[in-house]
Image: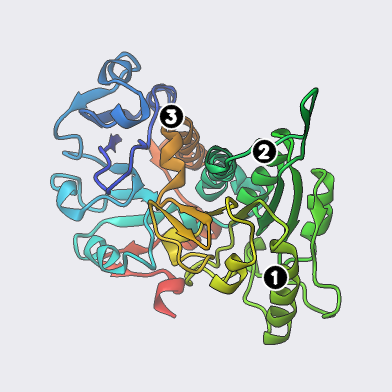
Amino acid sequence: MRIAVLKETANGESRVAASPETVKKFIALGASVAVQAGAGEGASVSDAEFAAAGAEVTKDAAKGADIVLGVQGPDPKALKGANPGAWIVAGLDPFGQRARVDDYAKAGFEALAMEFMPRITRAQSMDILSSQSNLAGYKAVIEAANAYGRAFPMMMTAAGTVSAAKCFVMGVGVAGLQAIATARRLGAQVSATDVRSATKEQIQSLGAKPIFVESVAGIEGEGAGGYATEMSEEYQKAQAELVSSHIAKQDIVITTALIPGRAAPRLISDAQIATMKPGSVIFDLAVAQGGNVEGSKPDEVVVRHGVKIIGWANTPAHLAADASALFARNLYNFLSAFWDKEQGKPVLDEEIGNAIRLTHGGKVVNERLLG
C-alpha cells in the first residue's frame, strides 16, 4: 500500500496533507509513503523532516500510489502514474469543482470528499471542516484586532479609561465559537447570534451575550448534521431588523455563516455597514462562497463608509503549520480507523463510505451530486 502526498498547487494554498508525525504512523500500519519534493515548504516542514520520518521524497510521488492525500483536490494530470482505482482523499469541493470530480471518475479513481464526512460521534476526529474552521475563527479575530485602530480590552490608566471593544459574531458553528472565545480572551465585550436556537446556551457558556429573534416562534434553524438551514422570510425580516439595531453599536463583526452546497447567506447589507462607526472592522469568513457581507472581496481589504471589510479566500492557510498538522491527523484518523491488517489497506463501511465517496467504477455515485 503506497500513500502519496502531493504538493498543493491551488493559488494561495500553503498547507500540506501529511506531517512527519502521520508519516511515521502510516508506516507503522505497514504502508509506504511518498512525499512530493517541496510539499511541506509552505507549512514549514522540510523535505529532510519527511525523509527522517521514513517517507520517500521524490518529484514523482503519485507514481504507483494506491492512495493520494491532498488538502485540496489535485489536478487529474498530477495523478499520472497512480494505480487504477487509487483513492483520492482530500477536501474536493464537490459542488464547486464538479468537472474535476467527473474527471476523477473518467480516470477510474475513487474520490473521497473529506468535507462530506458525516457529523457523527465516531467521525469527529476525521472532520476537516471542524479542525480548519476552529483555526479560521481564531485567525479572523486576530486579524480584525490587528486592523482595528484601537485596543480590545478595557484599560484604566492615569490618563483616562480606554473602553473595551464591542465584538459581534454572526454564526455560531465551530468557527464562530472559537471567534467568541478568542475575542473574549482579548478582552472585548462579545455578543453573538445564530439561526439555531440551540446555540444560545453555547454562547452564554463562553461568556458572551446571545442576540436572538424572540418574536418569531417555532423556528429552530437546525438542518441535517447540525448545519444551519435557510430560514423563512418572516424570520429573515425579523433577524435583519434585530441585527440592524445591534450592528450599529459594534466595533468588530465576524461573520461565519455557510450552508453546504449553497452560496453563503447575505447577513450584512451596505445600508447596515453605513450605520457602523468609522474605523470599525468586519471579517467575512464566508467570502470565498460569495460572502456574508455586501461588497466583501476575497483577499482584499475593502473600505465602505469608513468600515474595513476583510475576507480571505483561504483563512486556514494563513496558519499553515497548525492547520496542516490538524488536517494531517484528520486524514490519518480516517484511514487508520478502517485499516484492515489482513488486507493491508483501509476498507470503508457503508455509513461513512457512502457519505464521502464521490466516484467509483468510472461513475459519479454520490447521491448529493446526483440529486
Tell me where residue 69 sits by quadrant.
top left
Q: What residue type is disc 2 on?
A: Thr
What residue is shown at x 61% (from left), y 49% (from top)? 175
Residue 13 percent across, percent down from the top left: 33, 43
Inspect this view and state whether residue 120 appears. yes
- Label 3 vs 2, first from the N-terminus: 2
Residue 182: numbered disc: 2
- Mark 3 or 2: the one toward you: 2
Residue 103 percent across, percent down from the top left: 22, 64
Q: Secondary structure at mark 3?
A: helix
- Label 1 vs 2, first from the N-terminus: 2
Above/below status of 84 relative to 230: above
- Label 1 vs 3, first from the N-terminus: 1
Tell me where residue 111 sits by quadrant.
bottom left
Q: What residue type is disc 1 on?
A: Ser
Residue labelled with disc 1:
244
